[in-house]
Amino acid sequence: MWCLSLELKTPFLMVSGGPESFKHYVISLLGVAKNSVSMSTSMYPGFYNDPDVKQAFESCVLRVKSFRLLLDGRVNLSKLRDGVPWLFELKKRSPHLEIKKAGSPIVHWIIVDDQHLRLEVRHGLEEYAKRNVIIFSAPPSTVEVVKRVFEGWWGKARVVK
């Protein structure tokens, strides 16, 4: 595991435990989004099919101007279509929801309005995250590093129809 030491004057949280421990923060991040969201994820059905998470996700996609969803390279698209069918229905209704699949395993992040972050500690594909770092109003230099990595993944990913 790597550690990044920053002098932060911004509140950040390390959230450990199961989905219930960080569900609130994911919903909060999606709720504050005004313009853009870039998310890398496996769209784990056990988490994203939760009614509150699903509602926050759908509302966010319909509200923001850009929502880029980058699926982990380990995701089986057939299983995802069966496990989270509402995602692909939402794609049909929202022209600014872009979905791509990475060509390799990636870590799972949420970048909201180039300001707020959720950074997961790597975990297995068929399990929920066990630890997350949540940063509201992240330092611009931190956001730039995370965005640069995400952009690299996004540029190499293939479009999911």
Image: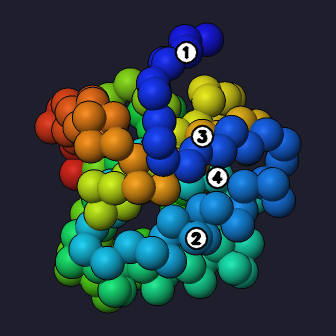
Q: CA distance from mark 4 to mark 2?
A: 18 Å
Q: Earlier in the sequence, mark 3 or mark 1?
A: 1
Question: Is disc 4 surrounded by few (<14), some (14 to 19) or many (20+) residues within 10 Å?
Answer: some
Discs 2, 1 touching: Cβ within 8 Å: no
**137 or 81, nearer to the observer:** 137
Q: Amino acid at mark 3?
A: Val
Relative to 159, say whether 132 is above or below. above
Discs 3, 4 touching: Cβ within 8 Å: no
Picture coordinates of residue 65, whole percent (x, y):
21, 77
Q: Amino acid at mark 2?
A: Ser
Judge left or right: residue 26 versus residue 110. Answer: right
Judge left or right: residue 98 versus residue 7. Answer: left
Question: Is disc 2 surrounded by few (<14), some (14 to 19) or many (20+) residues within 10 Å?
Answer: some
Picture coordinates of residue 124, whole percent (x, y):
68, 29
Report which residue position mark 1 lands on: 3
Q: CA distance from mark 2 to mark 1?
A: 25 Å
Q: What residue lies at 46% left-to-right and 27% top-to-bottom?
A: 7
Mark linked to residue 141? none
Q: Nearer the viewer, mark 4 or mark 1?
A: 1
Q: Amino acid at mark 4?
A: Tyr
Judge left or right: residue 4 versus residue 129. Answer: left
Picture coordinates of residue 121, whole percent (x, y):
62, 30
**118 or 38, nearer to the observer:** 118
Report which residue position mark 2 lands on: 28
Mark linked to residue 44? 4
Discs 3, 1 touching: Cβ within 8 Å: no
Q: Earlier in the sequence, mark 2 or mark 3?
A: 2
Relative to 116, say whether 87 is above or below. below
> What is the secondary structure assignment of the residue under circle 2?
helix
**80 or 138, nearer to the observer:** 138
Report which residue position mark 3 lands on: 133
**54 or 100, nearer to the observer:** 54
